[in-house]
Amino acid sequence: MANFFDTVIEVLKQDERFFSEEGELLRNTVYESAMKMDSDLLKLLYNNEMTRERFFTDVDGISVFDKVGFGWVINNRQFLPDSYTRYKNKIGLTNGNGDYISTSNDVELVFPYKDCVLAGGQTKEDQNRSEIFYNETLAPDEVDRLLYPKVFTNAKRYTTNGKEEIVEFNENDNLIIKGNNLLVLASLLKRFEGKIKCVYIDPPFNTQKDDFKYNDNFNHSTWLSFMRNRLMIAKKLLAPDGSIFVHLDFHESHYAKILMDEIFGRECFRNNIVWCYTGPSGSNNFLPRKHDDILYYSKTENNKYHIQYIEHKSGVHNSGQVFGSTDVIDNFKAEAEQKGKKLEDFWLDIYSTDRYRSEMLGFAGQKPEKLIQRILNISTDENDIVLDFHLGSGTTAAVAHKMKRKYICVEQMESQIELSIDRLINVIDGEQTGISKDVDWQGGGSFVYCELAKLNQKYVDGIQTATNDSEIVSIWEEMLKTGFISCKVKPSEIDMEDTDFLELSLDDKKRFLMEMLDKNQLYVNYCDIEDETFAVSEADKAFTKSFYGGM
């Protein structure tokens, strides 16, 4: 069998699309090419006698390609065990029973599936790395610990008088939280389950242009896993009359619709809002794409909804509607003249941020304040709580603040946190951009900023930014001192001077250290707040206990 695998590799080497610059096989690319019946791939396989006999069947003089069988070979664990896999087997990583993985007969799914937990731990815009999956090795009770409520740190309140450190959370506080949004959402459940009136998110669209960049391992299925984990918790946070709006484009909107039908129920689908923006059309040969989709669902069928009207640009127009009596016509005409046209699900009257230059912050994908204003007008009243766990440039927080809604916003990228805080400080000071004039905004209010207290996450940050072997070794030595490494690791078996380890690429060394970490210890769990090992300050203890209500 080994000789056959070698033959397949030699055949694939004839097409440079299937190998990285470092010479590593891109399994995903090969697999997707096979599923699409790529003609160049089929020719390569057919021209080799061994692969032709294995993957092609003659049917009435026609050669039929067995793409399923080929896919099984490509995904077979015995096929091309790379240097990273060989090294893991060598050092003796163990499974949950303490047995060496290399001698285990367990069968593991190697693709992200419906019930996996995807962390999505990017903290800098320029990071382009493999995401960390918690589906293959964590048992259900371990996933529960991953999602335990966390300790908060570095709490500050921003007001018209400036910034002050605080030790108490107020019921009316607005919140900006820095940290992994999956783990923040899980922490919010203890206090806010069933209380959020509106969730609006503008998540990464799964394109190469996103700040949240994707490599060969991040495809539709992993994006959907990423979204599913978060949407499941978001549903729990929604009030019975609450609504959720998910802003996407053509890359994932159709996939997300199916996912959200599963989570919220098809009966709770309200609209696919088409936001038709303006801007440069480009010079490609296809119809220019000029709209985004906003999927609108409710928690139950009894959601809060306020009818909205938009102003006619030039009086009452002929809508093409047919009426049965002159009384109905007169009533409709009077309502149209007085209130305007009833809002529908095709929004042409709100432009992209390019047209509202005073709002622009230099953030790619920034949405106009008027767009968020409309969504909040539809679904909320004053003092209702709004949640956005992909805060970005802070538009949702800024609009909610001006509209006197309470808000909870989450972001893990440092640059975007800084941008959002600066923006909200300007809002408090009474800035007059965006919707300020529409709502007669004069300034005021406050918000609280806090962070999840890091534990192993600080090593994740260090691993991501490491640029050489010496930094990798230094991080490993620090990890050993803490003891917060995976129970599957036998430290005595690991030698950073081992030839096999040294031959790994820098990316594989980083990946190796990631696997060594105890994933349940990324942040400090609330249940460990009094443990001296974690050195939680008295101020952080006070704020965290206040937030959770002393539970």
Image (cartoon, grey):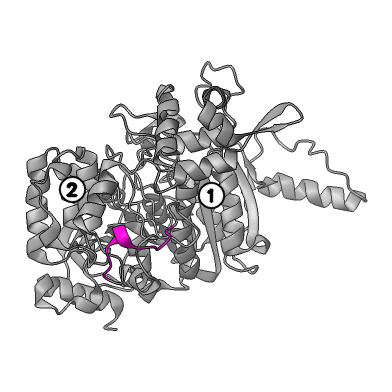
Give the residue type at disc 2: Ile
Packing grade of label 1 (10 A; few <14, some 14-19, many >=20) is few
The answer to which image quadrant residue 444 occupies is: bottom left
Which is more toward the observer, 337 or 420? 420
Question: Which amino acid is tagged 1?
Answer: Arg
Pinpoint residue 113: horizontal percent, then vertical percent.
48, 56
| Quadrant of image for the C terminus | bottom left
Task: Identify which residue is drawn at 83% across, 43% down.
Answer: 321
Please tell me whether mark 1 sits on a helix, a strand or a loop: helix
Residue range of the region highlighted in magenta in the rendering = 98-108
Side of 383 relative to 342 (left or right): left
237 relative position to 133: left or right: right
Q: Which mark is residue 430?
A: none
Q: Where 95 sits versus 120, above or below? A: below
Tag 2: Cα neighbours inside 10 Å, few (<14), some, or many (≥20)? many
- Give the residue at the far bottom of this rendering: 551
Secondary structure state at the residue bearing disc 2: helix
- Residue 290: x and y in percent read 56, 30
Is residue 243 positioned above or below 396 on the image? below
The residue that label 2 is drawn on is 463
Q: 282 or 460: which is nearer to us? A: 460
Q: Residue at x 39, y 51 (%)?
A: 390
The residue under label 1 is 374
Chief SS of the magenta region: loop
x and y percentages locating residue 432 in the rendered image: 35, 42
Q: Is residue 390 left or right of residue 459?
A: right
Q: Residue at x 74, y 38 (%)?
A: 316
**Relative to residue 359, is residue 474 depicted above or below?**
below
